Amino acid sequence: MGLFSRMETVLKSKMNKMLNKMEDPRETLDYSYEKQLELLQNVKRGVAEVTTSKKRLQLQRAKLVQSMDKLERQAKEAIAANREDLARLALERKAALTQQVDGIDSEIAELEKQEEKLIASEKRLSTKVEIFRTRKESIKAQYSAADAQVKINESVTGISEEMADVGLALERAENKTEEMKARADAIDELMETGTLEDLTGSRDEIDRELSKISTQTNVESDLTRLKAEAGKGQEKTGEEGKGAEERKEV
């Protein structure tokens, strides 16, 4: 029994949890409001039925009263015609109708009491239904707002997580780009120094060495030329000084 009791408790808790997820409070409130409206309509129908019954009895009573009045006139006419027997018969029928009218009056009074109770119940229930409707709409509005806020927060949370992933991806892309730029710069430097041969170019190692020799030869030629020009300048300066001294002696 202990095991089955535990299993029953677990199953009930699972079902309750599942129902909580499936249940929409707004639908529950609307359903409760509809049931209250049905109850209110039943009370109104009860009031209408009691009122109809009372009206029917009142019409029946009115007909009996008319018959009683007629019997009263007949009894008077019989007395006037010295027909006491007919007067007695009319009065007996009138007495029977009077008993019926008294019974109908009792039924009408009872129906009036029921009608008053039903009308009071209808008013109280109508007030409660209206209060419930107002509260229902307020709760539904609050629930809808809270539900929308939850969805917005969940969306923002999802966007934040996505943006975090995007940020990491951008950081990885930037790091990789910097790494590729560094590698490209290193390869350019190695190619410039000749350490790494540019297989895509048209110049081989011999061409590069010949280019270096040509460059050095051009440098030496320019250096010799500059020295020669500098020497000629000194010779011209010496000859001009000698001529000036000779002019002074003359």
Image (spheres, grey):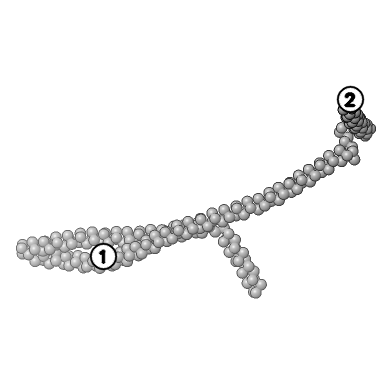
Front residue of 237 and 163: 237
At 34% from the left and 62% from the top, the residue drawn is 123
Residue picked out by circle 2: 250
Front residue of 187 and 207: 207
Residue 240 appears anywhere in the view:
no
How many other residues sit within 10 Å of disc 2, few (<14), some (14-19) or many (≥20)? few
Q: Quadrant of residue 86?
A: bottom left
Q: Is residue 51 left or right of residue 37?
A: left
Residue picked out by circle 1: 108
Query: In the structure shown, which secondary structural element does the residue marked by tag 2 occupy?
Result: loop
Question: Which label lies toward us, 2 or 1?
Answer: 2
Query: In the structure shown, which secondary structural element does the residue marked by tag 1 occupy?
Result: helix
Q: Position of residue 19 (x, y in %)?
A: 57, 61
Q: Is residue 84 left or right of residue 19?
A: left
Q: Quadrant of residue 191?
A: top right
Front residue of 57 and 30: 30
Disc nearer the start of the sequence (2/1): 1
Q: Position of residue 201 (x, y in %)?
A: 87, 32
Classify the position of the C terminus by image quarter.
top right
The residue under label 2 is which amino acid type? Val
Residue at mark 2 to residue at mark 1: CA–CA distance:
174 Å
- View extreme (front): residue: 250
Question: Is residue 230 shown above or below 120?
Answer: above
Q: Is residue 106 left or right of residue 229?
A: left
At 39% from the left and 60% from the top, the residue drawn is 130
The residue under label 1 is which amino acid type? Ile
